Image: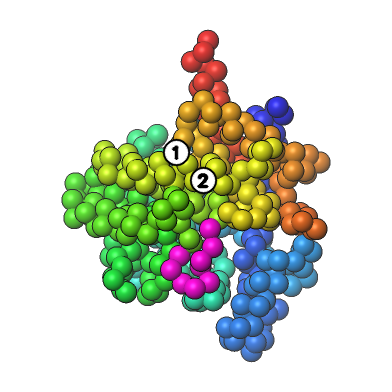
């Protein structure tokens, strides 16, 4: 296998060269050219513009004056990866870099006067079919990933202020995102929207359970369990979940399935409760059976390997080693990591490809979607492997 430590170090250096900033598949609405026209106010124009930017293998962002920026979720992933490298090596530079990025994240919290609690959003306006989200409006996924990173850093360095900020994010989730509609109880993706998405709701439940236990707030824990049970009830008999409840969310993909399982494991560990064991077992069996080819390629959908995407490989590392963790799971993970490198790594740039379809390879350097996930997952894998090797010696 490739020297993954050297490879990931090269990837980190390429990220550091851009000061952890870059482009994103969904940042096309940051175009100052589009924003200067009346067309920007039309939701269908925004949706089409965003989708063209996401799908085009040619990067028009410099021409369209889309600036490179840091993304809070991406920075959260970088912090998590840096802490994995720090735990593996003890090298202080990783910890110092993580602390610098954490300080930046504290300045990026969504408007505290409006939201009252710690929360984060994306650095771009985001138009989906179901809703429009202006830059900075908090969402549950960014908030959870940032909170987890800050909590891990705060715990490692005994910085109670970081821990407090991270746990406070659960208050935002509980008060602003808890939703009861259509006979369901769940955490919404963003405030004020009613779309039910399993991975978003489960990550919110997991973090509220963690925070509730640490804060001694049993009501918060009870709410988290109620929300998690909603997704458990809607798990299919074969162990799968569709993405969400809306008609255009009736697809099943690998990395969101991995999110669901990782979140449920975090919730289970926080509550020390075996209630969800059967759900995790069935979901994991479906995941392993469905989302990998014989050669270790991570499939995007349950019925289609394409697009081949580093995001799918990266989440596979976390799912196989956190949810699985058996010798067979590690063997599959080894194969998956090597396959990601064979298919998607660009050694001359020290970066990973965004996506491959059957006919086209998109090599645009996306910092949050691709490189952050690649670095964080490889750092986790390297630490996991180092600990196993150390235990054998």
**Residue at 57% in and 83% down:** 43
Residues packed near mark 1 inside 10 Å, few (<14), some (14 to 19) or many (20 plus): many
Residue that numbered label 2 is attached to = 287
Residues packed near mark 2 inside 10 Å, few (<14), some (14 to 19) or many (20 plus): many
Q: Quadrant of residue 115?
A: bottom left
Q: Is 250 in the magenta? A: yes
SS majority, magenta: loop
Find residue 142 and name its label.
Answer: none
Along the polypeptide, which appears first: circle 2 or circle 1? 2
Q: Nearer the viewer, mark 2 or mark 1?
A: 2
Expressed as whole percent of the image width and height from the top left, the position of residue 378 reads 60, 37
**Residue at 18% in and 55% down:** 219
Q: Please tell me whether mark 1 sits on a helix, a strand or a loop.
A: helix
Expressed as whole percent of the image width and height from the top left, the position of residue 384 reads 52, 28
Residue that numbered label 1 is attached to = 323
Q: Is 197 in the magenta? A: no
As drawn, is 357 to the left or to the right of 266?
Answer: right
Q: Please tell me whether mark 2 sits on a helix, a strand or a loop.
A: helix
Asked whether residue 341 appears in the rendered view, the answer is: yes
Which region shows up in magenta?
Answer: 244-252
Q: Nearer the viewer, residue 66 or 283?
A: 283
Q: Are marks 2 and 1 in contact (CB under 8 Å)?
A: yes
Q: CA distance from mark 2 to mark 1?
A: 11 Å
Q: Nearer the viewer, residue 312 or 66?
A: 312
As drawn, is 348 to the left or to the right of 291?
Answer: right
**Residue at 54% in and 35% down:** 380
Q: Is residue 81 above or below residue 389?
A: below
């Amino acid at each position: 296998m490739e020297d993954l430590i050297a490879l990931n170090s090269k990837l980190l250096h390429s990220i550091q060269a851009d000061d952890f900033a870059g482009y994103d598949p969904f940042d096309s609405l940051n175009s100052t050219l589009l924003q200067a026209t009346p067309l920007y106010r039309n939701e269908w124009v925004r949706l089409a513009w965003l989708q063209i930017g996401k799908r085009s293998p040619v990067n028009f962002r410099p021409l369209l004056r889309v600036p490179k920026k840091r993304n809070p979720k991406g920075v959260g992933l970088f912090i998590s990866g840096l802490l994995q490298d720090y735990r593996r090596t003890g090298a202080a530079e990783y910890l110092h870099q993580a602390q610098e990025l954490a300080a930046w994240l504290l300045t990026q919290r969504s408007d505290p006067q409006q939201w009252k609690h710690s929360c984060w959003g994306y650095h771009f306006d985001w138009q989906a079919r179901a809703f429009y989200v202006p830059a900075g409006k908090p969402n549950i996924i960014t908030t959870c990933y940032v909170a987890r990173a800050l909590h891990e850093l705060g715990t490692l360095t005994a910085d109670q202020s970081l821990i407090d900020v991270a746990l406070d994010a659960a208050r935002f989730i509980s008060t602003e995102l808890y939703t009861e509609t259509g006979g369901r109880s769940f955490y919404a993706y963003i405030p004020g929207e009613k779309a039910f998405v399993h991975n978003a709701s489960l990550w919110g439940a997991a973090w509220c359970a963690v925070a509730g236990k640490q804060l001694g707030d049993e009501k918060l824990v009870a709410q988290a369990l109620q929300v998690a049970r909603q997704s458990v009830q809607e798990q299919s008999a074969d162990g799968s979940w569709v993405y969400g409840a809306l008609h255009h969310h009736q697809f099943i993909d690998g990395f969101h399935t991995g999110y669901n399982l990782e979140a449920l494991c975090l919730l289970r560990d926080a509550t020390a409760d075996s209630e969800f064991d059967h759900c995790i077992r069935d979901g994991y069996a479906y995941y392993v059976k469905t989302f990998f080819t014989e050669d270790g390629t991570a499939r995007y959908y349950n019925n289609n390997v394409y697009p081949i995407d580093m995001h799918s490989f990266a989440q596979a590392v976390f799912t196989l080693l956190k949810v699985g963790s058996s010798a067979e799971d590690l063997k599959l993970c080894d194969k998956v990591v090597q396959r990601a490198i064979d298919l998607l790594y660009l050694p001359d740039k020290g970066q990973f490809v965004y996506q491959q379809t059957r006919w086209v390879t998109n090599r645009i350097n996306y910092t949050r979607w691709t490189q952050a996930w690649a670095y964080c997952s490889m750092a986790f894998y390297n630490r996991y492997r180092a600990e196993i090797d150390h235990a054998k010696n």
